[in-house]
Image (cartoon, rainbow, N blue to C red):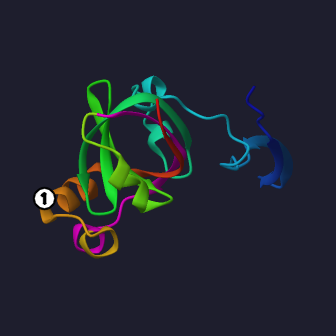
Amino acid sequence: MELLLRLAVVMLVDGAAAQVEEPAPVDSETQAPVDGEALFADDAELLAEGTNVHLENVVVRAKSGLMMRVAVGRHQIYVAPVDPSMLEFLAVGATVDVRGTLRRAPSAPQARLAYAMSSHEARRLARQGVYLDAWSLGRS
């Protein structure tokens, strides 16, 4: 169930008061999570920073530094696990469940430093625009 809070905004229009309803910003902790299919649908709003995401049975495609890239159907997204040491126990090709929040991707030079990534993977992350800051990562 999605809870939408509405905020009444009073505006002055030609000296008269008019009441207009606008949606309040959604708190990412109370927002319903988005699954992989919905995440990469045509709705670009869902790829916004702060969106909660639950991905199930995704395949690890690559690991670079403190991040990994997982496949969601024909799409791929970078994942930064809360505990990077978890990457040591995951092989490329493993199937995992990931839960986290979308964050804005850093620039390529920042990604290389912050996540110890290869320059190729850092450029790819920067072009993608968002990554998944995972607070839960487990094998499927």
Decide: is 125 above or below 56: below
Q: Is residue 82 left or right of residue 28?
A: left
Q: How many marks?
A: 1
Quarter assignment of residue 69: top left
Q: Is residue 63 left or right of residue 130?
A: left
- The residue indicated by pointer 1 is 120
Q: Is residue 57 left or right of residue 119?
A: right
Rendered location of residue 101, percent (x, y): 54, 49
Decide: is 33 above or below 84: above
Residue at 51% x, 59% y is 82
Q: Based on the picture, tell me whether residue 97 belongs to the magenta stretch.
A: yes
Rendered location of residue 24, percent (x, y): 73, 47
Residue in front for this viewpoint, 106 or 92:
92
- Residue 129 visible? The answer is no
Residue at 18% x, 60% y is 123
Residue neighbourhood size for the residue with mark 1, other residues' Cα within 10 Å, grouped as few (<14), some (14–19), many (≥20)? few
- Residue 19 visible? The answer is yes
Decide: is 40 above or below 92: above
Q: Is residue 98 left or right of residue 66?
A: right
Rendered location of residue 70, percent (x, y): 32, 39
Residue at 26% x, 70% y is 116
Q: Based on the picture, tell me whether residue 73 belongs to the magenta stretch.
A: no
Rendered location of residue 120, percent (x, y): 13, 58
Going by the numbered disc 1, the residue's amino acid type is: His
Mark 1 secondary-structure assignment: helix
User: Which quadrant does the N terminus fall into?
Assistant: top right
In the current view of this chain or complex, which residue is farthest to the front? Answer: 89
Q: Which residues are magenta?
A: 94-111
